[in-house]
């Protein structure tokens, strides 16, 4: 389903069953065919929603209507919201956006500027060149955090564990929204 995906683990069948009526059919197809893995040159990770659901609910004001579906290489979480929007929680910046209204359009335009403007891809490519590719459980985190006066450049990035990094941002900088 996804082009150039690097497959990791299989999405557990119980997760597919749990969410199949809450997320778009295309996402269910991705879970069935591709499982968990990375795409868009490793920038996006297909995730198990249950692994991030509690975190999103605790740290994002729209968490009760959001299902986490992807994580970026900078620890931002892409969500399926209100069963109609693809959103992004930008923990590193302390902001959020609705990216696009339709999941099919999200997949169709994933390489377009309309979607990638949310992603900081040039900085990601610099980081990969300097630090190498990320493990599935890692993202690049700014040190110090941007909310604490850090600089948004490749020199101030470290490899960090995604979940713990998001939790740290929320604890030190506050929740989103």
Image (tube, rainbow, N blue to C red):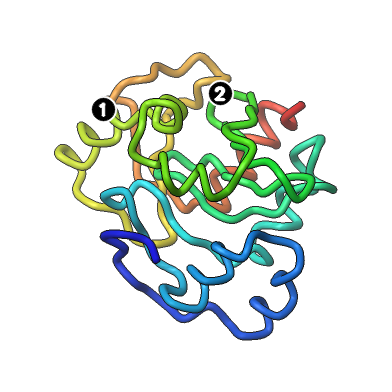
Question: Toward which corner of the image does residue 12 lie, by quadrant?
Answer: bottom right
Q: Nearer the viewer, residue 36 or 150?
A: 36
Q: Residue at x 68, y 66 (%)?
A: 50
Q: Which mark is residue 99?
A: none
Which corner quadrant of the image does residue 82 belong to? Answer: top right
Q: Is residue 62 above or below residue 156?
A: below
Q: In the image, is residue 32 above or below residue 51?
A: below
Q: Nearer the viewer, residue 49 or 108?
A: 108
Q: Residues within 10 Å of mark 1 (few under 14, many from 20)?
A: few
Instruction: Tell me the residue at 43%/39% (across/down).
Output: 74
| Image quarter in which the N terminus is found | bottom left
Give the residue displayed 53% in from the left and 40% down from the top.
76
Tell me what residue is drawn at x 19 percent, y 48 percent: 132
Which x, y percent locates residue 46?
48, 60
Q: Which mark is residue 93?
A: 2
- On the image, the x and y values in percent for residue 59 come to 75, 40
Q: Position of residue 166 (x, y in %)?
A: 59, 43
Cα separation between marks 1 and 2: 17 Å
The secondary structure type at the circle numbered 1 is helix
Work out whether 174 lies above or below 40. above
* Left or right placement of residue 40 versus residue 172 in this view: left
Residue projecting furthest to the bottom: 13
Label drawn at residue 122:
1
Q: Residue furthest right?
A: 64
Mark 2 secondary-structure assignment: loop
Please tell me how crowded label 2 is: few (under 14), some (14-19), or many (20+) other residues with Cα within 10 Å. Answer: some
Compared with 155, 170 (above or below) is below
């Amino acid at each position: 389903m996804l082009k150039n995906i690097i497959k990791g683990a299989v999405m557990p069948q119980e997760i597919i069953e749990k969410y199949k009526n809450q997320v778009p059919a295309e996402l269910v197809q991705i879970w069935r065919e591709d499982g968990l893995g990375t795409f868009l040159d490793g920038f996006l990770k297909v995730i198990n929603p249950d692994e991030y659901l509690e975190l999103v609910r605790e740290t994002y004001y729209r968490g009760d209507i959001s299902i986490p579906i992807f994580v970026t290489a900078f620890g931002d979480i892409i969500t399926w919201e209100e069963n109609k929007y693809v959103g992004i929680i930008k923990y590193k910046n302390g902001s959020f956006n609705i990216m696009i209204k339709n999941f099919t359009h999200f997949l169709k335009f994933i390489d377009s500027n309309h979607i990638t403007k949310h992603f900081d891809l040039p900085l990601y490519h610099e980081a990969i060149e300097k630090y190498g590719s990320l493990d599935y459980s890692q993202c690049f985190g700014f040190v110090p955090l941007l909310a604490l006066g850090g600089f948004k450049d490749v020199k101030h990035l470290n490899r960090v564990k995604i979940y713990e990094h998001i939790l740290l941002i929320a604890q030190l900088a506050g929740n989103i929204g």
